[in-house]
Image (spheres, helix red, strand yellow):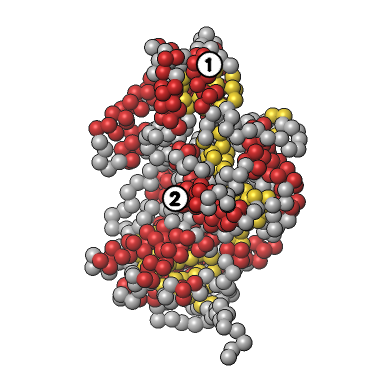
Amino acid sequence: MPESFLRPPKAEFPLVRLVGEDGTRLGHSPTEPDAETQTQLFRWMVFGRVFDQRMISLQRQGRIGTIGTIRGQEASAAGLALAMRRTDWLVGSYRELLAYVAHGVAIENVLNLYRGGVPGPFPEGVGAMPVQIVIGTQLPHAAGAALAAKLRGSDDVVVGCCGDGATSEGDFHEGLNFAGAHKVPAVFFVQNNGWAISVPRGRQTASETIAEKAWGYGMPGVLVDGNDALAVYAVAKEAIDRARAGEGPALIEALTYRVGPHTTSDDPRRYRSDDEVAQHEKDDPIVRLRLLMEKEGAYEEGMQERFEEEARAAMSLAIERAEAVANVTPETIFDLTWAAPTPSVLRDRQRTLEDLKEIGEVGKE
Amino acid sequence: MKANIVEAIQDAMRVALARDKEVVVLGEDVGRNGGVFRATDGLQAEFGEDRVFDTPLAESSIVGVGVGLAAYGMHPICEIQFGGFLYITMNQIASQAARLRMRTGGQMRAGMVIRAPYGGNVRTPDLHSDSLEALLAHTPGVKVVMPSTPYNAKGLLLAAVDDPDPVVFLEPMRIYRGLRAEIPDGHYEVALGEARIAREGQDVTLVAYGAEVQTSLEAAEQLSAEGISCEVVDLQTVSPYDRETVLASVEKTGRAVVVHEAVRQAGMGAEIAAVIQEQAFYSLAAPVQRVTGWNTPFPFVQAEHLYVPGAAHIAQSVRRALQD
Ligand SMILES: Cc1ncc(C[n+]2csc(CCOP(=O)(O)OP(=O)(O)O)c2C)c(N)n1
């Protein structure tokens, strides 16, 4: 008889890396990005850095509402997005804004949302659900959309994203469990950035990794260095290709770090030391990829500056366009509530508008 | 001491933790961070990690664990970071906390407090501004308390902690820091289930709760310049609410306007108007008016100032009530 009937929780999820922190090549993978994709990865990561800075400054100027920061997480977002096909569905949250834009969602969609308005239709052919604010809620949607893709005979894959904190929500477990049970073409991508506002990863779950939770849902899992753009891309590509081939879902944990505050209203000094942040800041995913590209002769002189310039121009243009319209009126709110309003809904809308007019709240020029 | 509403709430929890070791505070970011609004600031340092602690990010289990804690004899104060996330907890609140007493023939109870900030006009993202008191008021077995001043915030919260029933305590986010007033030190309670007259008047009764009490007082002040005298009834406890105080006021003034920022249809305004017409019909000189949010979800930020009743919206309905 064994000494104990209980089996220990087993955790064997080695960290997948293709590039070291100093830009040294550590390995190759059949699904790693080709030269052109590698340049695109770098380009989008640089865009992400510029985007983050611009959004924070817009918030400071009162031009948009509270915004989450993405500094340090660019490799995870870009690596994932570029491994997807445009028609694959991205189902994520406020921390995946770079992934959304790199996937094909317009910068203006994002700006409209953070300006407190209607995001507007996503560009034609881009698969995506709206940016989710209620933590974890999007994961059953990802499972459902993936089931629909399967039932309708499409070969689209649905990628459900969330943070480490979100893995504690019931919806996370229910979404992944469903996906496993129905073997749907979904990939779940967790950006483990170490913190859920002030709560460290270690307080969310007693399991050693998030990747190992995959076992419980009967799907493969992987722990990848989320600051290694090549590794994130390679891992995501493998999981997405596999799901597309009908082999079912997978869970990816991308280990990264949120260098900035949770949002523009957060004060991280209340719960973590500057030292900790400085330690992580040294491993800048953009620098890492650039060093690799330099070592391998793939970096062209002035590339980063060119991409920064391009990103700034794209942001400025989108801001100008978004700010030219205040896209929400009370009518919008009524019209977006019901797809098929009944006569009493329409009367209700009319009455509300008349009341607002009477007190001079609408109709004033 | 002088305190604003968040500070009064924090002080109430400090007093509760100090006087009863069965009280624990749990929620997201309530520990070291002191809550995203600083309502629990310093409490973990003062009372230790066993009494004030961060939970995993899972609202259903924050309330569900609270039910278990309460069943076993503790007095949990659960924090839900924003009122909109109460939707996630509805199963634990409505089908569990509210019915534990019934289910066990009175042997067990889920005496616990579930705190959450609510309300709009603070430029927050989706689901951070909803007012869900009507859903909860439709759930007998759960009390719903909505303070409006630093004084009643502290006194009502202390009463909620001592109450044997589950209490959802909805805090007016918009005026968390706006109002500062003198409040008593130490322990005191404002009884649950009792309304207060926030302003006396003769011509019309304004019934409000939470942040809209302040807006109603503003409207009353403006209307007094026109010679209209408003009485403002602050429900304080929204469910079960103090019908007697509302009815007595309406019997005096003959006119009533109910104010809330929650959705109009099936909101508290509908409930209160129904009770007034059932029980004070012959005192009424005009139909009961409602000033509320629209029959839509809480809107995008760009339209929220139109949705949340302001003093102008309230004054408009008061004038209508006086026209008839
Ligand atoms: C259901 C729900 N609960 C709480 C919040 C408030 N909130 C916003 S972000 C956040 C932390 C999320 O942490 P994590 O999932 O790790 O993602 P990260 O923000 O670090 O990317 C919390 C608690 C929310 N938006 N939704």
Q: Position of residue A263 (x, y in %)?
A: 56, 51
Q: Position of residue A65 (x, y in %)?
A: 50, 43
| Kind of residue at badge 1 | Cys
Image: B176 above or below A365 = below
> Dot 2: what SS?
helix
Q: Residue at x 62, y 42 (%)?
A: B163
Q: Residue A348, can we see it?
A: yes
- Residue at the spot of label 1: B230
- Residue at the spot of label 2: A315
**In this rendering, would B10 be left or right of A322?**
right
Q: Position of residue B238 (x, y in %)?
A: 52, 34
Q: Is mark 2 within 8 Å of ligand 1?
A: no
Q: Position of residue B38 (x, y in %)?
A: 65, 45
Q: Residues within 10 Å of mark 1 (few under 14, many from 20)?
A: many
Q: Residue at x 75, y 51 (%)?
A: B46
- Using the image as rendered, state which of residue B81 and residue B202 is in the foreground: B202
Which residue is at the far front? B105
